[in-house]
Image (tube, helix red, strand yellow):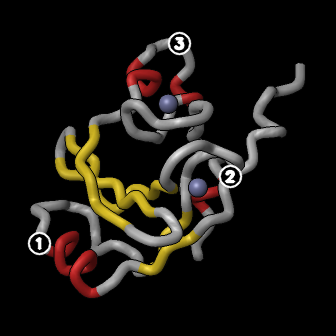
Amino acid sequence: MSIAQEDLRPCPARITLDAAQLAFFDGLPAEAPSVQTELGCELELGHEGSHAALGQQVEATMWWIQWTLSASEINPYTWCPAKSTPPVEERECTLFDGHPGRHVGGPDSPRSEAA
Ligand SMILES: [Zn+2]
Ligand SMILES: [Zn+2]
């Protein structure tokens, strides 16, 4: 059986957080260590709208940084509902509710390699 994940390529866009954005993330009551200064878009290649990368998670709220060529902002989201759909836990979507493009995620996400 082949897995229909082979053609799921991530968007190559990257962003470097500025001091104010890093300060915002540092100020969150998150258990995770501080955010990386450079983040990559986690949406699928060719997606519509802004690029998006998960900055920090605080309980049920995920803070995503979203950016375009000219601007960036940090917004709170909840998990994509596909994450909580039981059947196969490896296919949990790691994106935010309402994200453009297809669901992505799982343990073999290319995003897990260290930058
Ligand atoms: Zn993107
Ligand atoms: Zn999803």
- The quarter holding residue 104 reads top right
Query: Cβ of disc 2 within 8 Å of ligand 1?
Result: yes
Residue depicted at 80% across the width and 27% down the height: 4
Residue sitting nearer the eye, 14 or 115: 14
Foreground mark, 2 or 3, reads 2
Work out which quarter of the rendered image holds the N terminus and state it.
Answer: top right
**CA gap, disc 1 and disc 2:** 29 Å
Q: Is residue 48 above or below residue 24?
A: above
Q: Position of residue 63 (x, y in %)?
A: 27, 54
Mark 1 residue type: Gly
Q: Which mark is residue 10?
A: 2
Q: Position of residue 27 (x, y in %)?
A: 11, 72
Of 31 and 40, nearer the camera is 40
What crowding class fits label 1: few (fewer than 14 Cα within 10 Å), some (14-19), or many (20 or more)? few
- Please tell me whether mark 3 sits on a helix, a strand or a loop: loop
Which residue position is annotated with label 1?
27
Residue 47 lies, in percent from the top left, at 63, 44
What amino acid is at disc 2?
Pro
Front label number (3 vs 1) = 1
SS state under label 1: loop
Give whichever of discs 3 and 1 has the lower sequence position. Answer: 1
Crowdedness near tag 3: few (<14), some (14–19) or many (≥20) residues, C-alpha within 10 Å: few
User: Which quarter of the rendered image does ligand 1 occupy?
Assistant: bottom right
- Based on the displayed image, in which of its 4 quarters is residue 79 positioned? top left
Q: Which residue is mark 3?
A: 87
Query: Residue farthest to the right?
Result: 1
